[in-house]
Image: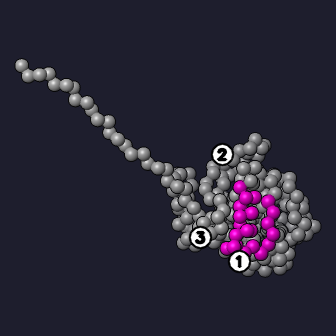
Amino acid sequence: MPPAKSPRKSRAKIIPIQAPKPAPIHPFDRLYHTDTGGLIPGPALATGHPNDAHITAYYAVAPSILNTLIDLWLGTQPPFPIDRYTLLDVGAGKGRAILTASQHPFHQIVGIELNPSLAAIARANIERFTSSPDASPLAPITLLEGDALEVPLPDTPTVALLFHPFEIPVLRKFLARLEQHFHERPGHLDILYVNAEHVHVLDRNMAFTRLFNGMIPMSPEDHLADLAEIAEQKEYGSTGDEFCTIFRFTGRT
């Protein structure tokens, strides 16, 4: 009788551990050693503020789009030279827009950010950027942490930058606040609206006149970075351009 065979031991299949993919780094951050990239959904940015329901996702503007939009704004023949304007970035996030805008000769650059974590990152980015030998800021940069409906507004001529920072209820309140602040100074306020999802709100506001409306393409470099940053989520897509508008506060005549 042959000896009984020992039961064959099954070998567990060894699955190699995949290291997580490093987050893509935008060329802007590689150049200046800043941290402005990534996409953060709106609910993850909630702070307990009453307007949490109306905030949108964090995603930084492509530098090529902002630079082109500023050039288009200059082509509208603003009433004052650029060095008299404050650029006010509403919903500054990690600060890429205010850093990019500082490379134009504005009077000053002011960012407003409600989320304390993003504001802290923005402040660190300002410090890194302004100390970078590769940066050439032409305007001083300030970051205000707080609610855009409450923080002080500039008394200089102002260009307000909106990269779809909030939904309609807050947008209407913010426009009303701008109108109240500048009501005796028509022509002292322009709005650059990127990803202008609620452009109809401004179009229906008799105090504002539209000066530009159209798609602005990203540079090839920015588009590649854009595709890489949003590749692992499904809510947002990249077309390589942004719908942008420019408005001027002309008052209610």
Q: The residue under label 3 is which amino acid type?
A: Met
Which residue lies at the image location 87% right of the left edge and 61% below the top edge?
Answer: 153
Which of marks 2 and 1 precedes in the sequence? 2
**Mark 1 → mark 2, Cα distance in angstroms:** 34 Å
Q: Decide if residue 107 is in sight here.
A: yes
Tell me which segment is drawn in magenta. Answer: 121-143
- Residue 134: x %, y % from top left: 67, 73
Residue projecting furthest to the left: 1
- Residue 85: x %, y % from top left: 83, 72
| Residue named by callout 1 | 71
The residue nearer to you, when weighing 207 against 248, is 248
Which of marks 1 and 3 precedes in the sequence? 1
Q: Is residue 190 magenta?
A: no
Q: Is residue 133 magenta?
A: yes
Q: The residue under label 2 is which amino acid type?
A: Ala
Q: Nearer the viewer, mark 1 or mark 2?
A: 2
Q: The residue under label 1 is which amino acid type?
A: Asp
State the SS at label 1: helix
Q: Quadrant of residue 74?
A: bottom right
- Mark on residue 44? 2
**Looking at the image, do the residues carrying marks 3 and 1 touch, with CB atoms under 8 Å apart?**
no
Work out which quarter of the rendered image holds the N terminus and state it. Answer: top left
Does 67 appear above or below 88?
A: below
